[in-house]
Image (cartoon, rainbow, N blue to C red):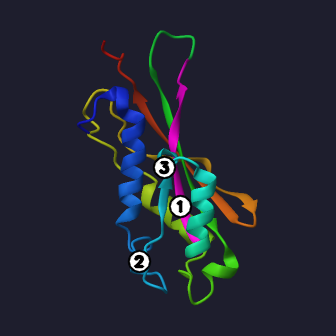
Amino acid sequence: MSTPATYALETLQSLMVSTLAVDPMFDGSQSANGAAVPILTEAIGDLVTQVGISIGKLGLCLVVRTPLFRFTNNLAPSLDGWALLSVDVFEDVTLNQSTSGTTISALSAAQRVLALAHHLPIGSPNTENNPSKFIGTDTPLQLANDGPPLNYSVLFQAHLTLSTPQP
């Protein structure tokens, strides 16, 4: 991981997006219509509108949200903690299961995200300030909304120590 630790949270998000983008379930190889599943982040702005546009076209999209950071011990003078990351799977079931959709169900996509990222290596485990892997949380797959649109959240954490930002 060559990005400075002060940018570690953005790096984790980018790693998740790039991992999902090359998987056959999401790159269009397994889509009935041959289209890649859109993978969005909040960096695009107006995420709610973009999710609506994406599921309006194909019926399915993923949203990788910037990780949150939770201290291991917030009373200690340390930047040691857990980066938390969520991948949301949104589906317009009617459109997605039609001939113009991917026919990949939201639940199948969420399970694939979990299988791909649980224990996904992150950086070098021997490098200070880098986490070694993503780990699913205690309840990593959750139905967030039964629709419309249908929404599953897949939750991960990664241990790391942030560096003090340099002036």
- Count neighbours of disc 3 (C-alpha within 10 A) and say few if under 14, some if 14 to 19, many if 20 or more: few
- Asked whether 167 falls inside the magenta stretch, the response is no
From this view, report whether residue 40 is shown above or below residue 160: below
Magenta range: 58-73
Q: Residue at x 75, y 65 (%)?
A: 147
Q: Quadrant of residue 75?
A: top right
Q: Quadrant of the N terminus?
A: top left
- Mark 1 falls on what kind of element? strand
Residue on which the image places disc 2: 28
Which label's residue is closer to the chain start, 1 or 3? 3
Within 10 Å of the Cα at label 1, are there few (<14), some (14-19), or many (20+) other Cα atoms? Answer: many
Task: Indicate the amino acid at tag 2.
Answer: Gly
Dot 2 crowding, Cα within 10 Å, few <14, some 14–19, many 20+: some
Residue depth check, mark 1 versus mark 3: number of the one nearer the observer = 3
- Label annotation for residue 62: 1
Q: Is residue 62 above or below residue 81?
A: below
Q: Inspect the image, locate mark 1, and give the three-letter code of the amino acid beneath it.
A: Leu
- Secondary structure mostly seen in magenta is strand
Give coordinates of residue 2: x percent, y percent: 23, 36
Residue 70 or residue 30, whichever sits in front: 30
The mark lying in front, picked from 2 and 3, is 3
Residue linked to disc 3: 44
